[in-house]
Amino acid sequence: MDRFADRRFEAFFEGAEPVVSDARVAPDRDDPLSSPHFDALIPPLIRWIADARGRLLVRGESPHASTDPFPAIRSGYDWRRALDPVDRKALLQAATHSANPRPLRVRMMGADGERRWAGLRMTCVSTGRGGTRWYGTIEYLPDLQDEVCALREALAEAREHYRWSVELNPQVPWTARADGALEEIGPRLREMTGISLDPRSHLRWNDMLHPDDAVATMARWDDHVQSGEPIIVEQRVRLTDGGYRWMRSKAAVRRDARGEVIRWYGTLEDIHDQKVAQDALAESEGRFRLAVQAAGLGIWDFDIETGARTWSPELRAMLGLADDVPATQECAMALVHPDDRSILQNMMATVARREATTHFEATLRIHRADDGALRWIRSMGWTTQSAGGRPKRVLVTFQDVTDQEEADARIRWAAGHDAMTGLPNRAAWQATLEQMTARADETGERFGLMLFDIDDLKRTNDALGHDAGDALLCEFAARLLAMAPPGAVLGRLGGDEFGLIATSLRDSDALQAISAAILENIRRPYVHDGRSLDCGVSIGGAVYGEHGRQAGELFKSADLALYASKASGRGRVTLFHSDLRAQAQQHSSMIRMARQAVSDKLITPYYQPKVDLHSGQTVGFEALLRWHHPRLGVQTPATIAAAFENCELAVAMTDRMLDAIVRDVRRWIRAGFDPGRVAFNASAADFMDDDFAQAVLRRFARGGVSPRHFEIEVTETVFLGRGADNVARALHRFSKAGVRVALDDFGTGYASLSHLKQYPVDVLKIDRSFINHLEGDAGDAAIVDAIVKLGTSLSIEVIAEGVETQRQRELLIDHGCRFGQGYLLGYPAPFVSPPKTAT
């Protein structure tokens, strides 16, 4: 039984103890073919015999071998250690499957400890007694060893070289059969697309392309497969993540000797980033073109290196140039307005010297080449530089900004002019005044300044409407412009105020003469919508060098003169003089003291009794304003008279007076004294507030005092002020609430007698100017008699003011006047409890 085959070299792996035998199995031969010369020509050869279990019985080598190439091979089972593990397995398999296996190449441990290649041959021989033995040889193969190692190393290097070349190369190799079916693809593409090729498959490009690219790509591919011509095509390849990437495919055909197509060889190049950049650039350029067209820009491109100039169609249209007109510097220069050519010349010269800055801009005027129209063109330029920092290219954009320039001009004009009259406004006029004073300060030249204020413009607006007032303003401006001396600068400084500056008005006489002529011209009637409009004007004048050397000082002098004209009756001319400045200082002082009196609560009421002239009994009081000067003591309203023209101060002083009056009346009533009616004065400024009457009545209610204890005094001028409508409403509210209404200083104002019917007047107060001369002036006596009779006929109480003598009292009684007040009847006094009664 063949136990070698059955037990599969068991002891070879079991490590059993070897059985050592010194018997020599191979017989000696006396044969020429066994000559040692043959042993010298062949590699060392080991002969061996093993039993069926693989136990080495005998080993021997060429008798002439100088060295033992494999000393590790010993009898027994230990000889397996000389074999490489892989070769041990190969030897076992060969012995198991065949009694005469084919030669094996194995690696065995050499004398130097390194494994060497050897050729192993063996055959199984029957012993004739039912047993078997293995006969074999081991041949040392030194040449094969070096060659195989070199081949292995070369193959490994070639594989690594190919792998690195393929993996790092951006171009992915592929091959296709003659019919175009893909045959091989590089590993990088397989990783990207997830496609694996089956040798039996007929994979084509359309299986991995974007749907939008598949049809066109395959059509071109099929055409080239038929023609065999090389092909270059760009397409998007589907990736494993579902996205797509742009690839450029290049392919060429390989033919045999007969010209038949053997195979297609090609590469795929990843051009995705380049394609995306190109698309982005194309999109950017498209947007730029649209933006240029939308913005109406023309482009001028100048290559500094070559001198080539390119004008865009939009620029040619802007300049009115035909397409065939050369883009030359001379052509551009001829179109530029002569006054602006130096700007373009400087720009061109800078570019020619290659000194152009990175960015520049300018606005030029041009005359269009086709129709000669004047247009404003704004240019903005950019310069690119070479690697050496020298200007390389100039790109200039042009935009027609004529409409914008015209709009800006209108805005600039509007910023410095009055829209209604077309004259310079206050800011522009005063800027001119500043310039003229600065120039006069250097040259010593004099000039005159005049201020004009239209008299009673408000009356025209109220009576005929604001359209009539506007027409009056425009006509006044036109006449003033016509009368102004040559070179004069006019301006509208406010609602009804105008100014004039002229270098020809060098002294007061010149100002006086021109003012007289203007007054005469202005007084001529105006006609508006068939109606004749009267116009008067007040004029104030000053001369540079005589009345001031600074713009502000000169204007102030003229303004003081204008104020004096208006205060003295309007329709007048006043030239500045030093007294006006003193008056202005006095006016400012009054305002300052009034502010202090209000803020420091220095205002207090003094009460002057109103007396029955027959019995001497006090029937009421008038609260007169007094204020305590910190140093001079109690002061009359005359010391702060200017404050009553200041709306803010006038209202504040009324508030202070009413607070004190309500407090004092409440104290009298609580003390058991009936003060009758206490009169308080209200100014035109008080009535500017539509809630004035309600506010006063609320103050009475908070103070716990009935309105029947009060009387409000107004002058006739209140009816003519800007708040005339408010005055009527307020007086009716007062009257309805029980507050009596007294018309103060009657006979001295401009009120019509019809006002006595329009307003709820309960009391007429005869002005002291008529009482002062009552004894010796028959006219004043007649006026007093008429006022008393008028009051009696209208059931209006009449009170005479300023009664200072007994004779005046007697005459008033004779004229039928029942009540009066004055120093004869009682001096104004601060609050006392209870007050003394006049006798």
Image (cartoon, grey):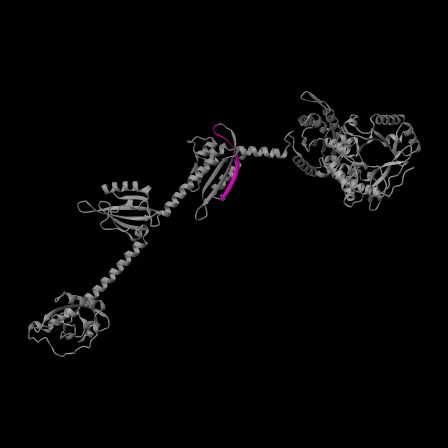
Query: Which percent across, then down, holds residue 219?
Result: 27, 40
Say which of 638 and 703 sits in front. 703
Extreme residue toward the top, this view: 530
Quadrant of residue 828 in the image? top right
Say which of 545 and 264 sits in front. 264
Left or right of 490? Residue 144 is left
Count of numbered tags:
0
**Is residue 309 shown in magenta?**
no
Q: Is residue 591 above or below residue 748?
A: below
Q: Main secondary structure of the magenta part?
A: strand
Q: Is residue 221 above or below residue 367?
A: below
Q: Is residue 183 above or below residue 477?
A: below
- Bounds of the magenta segment: 358-370
Quadrant location of the N terminus in the rendered image: bottom left
Residue 440 visible to the viewer: yes
Residue 71 visible to the viewer: no
Q: Is residue 755 above or below residue 169?
A: above
Quadrant of residue 129 in the image? bottom left
Left or right of 593? Residue 404 is left
Left or right of 827? Residue 584 is left
Query: Which percent across, then down, holds residue 467?
Result: 66, 26
Say which of 265 and 766 sits in front. 766
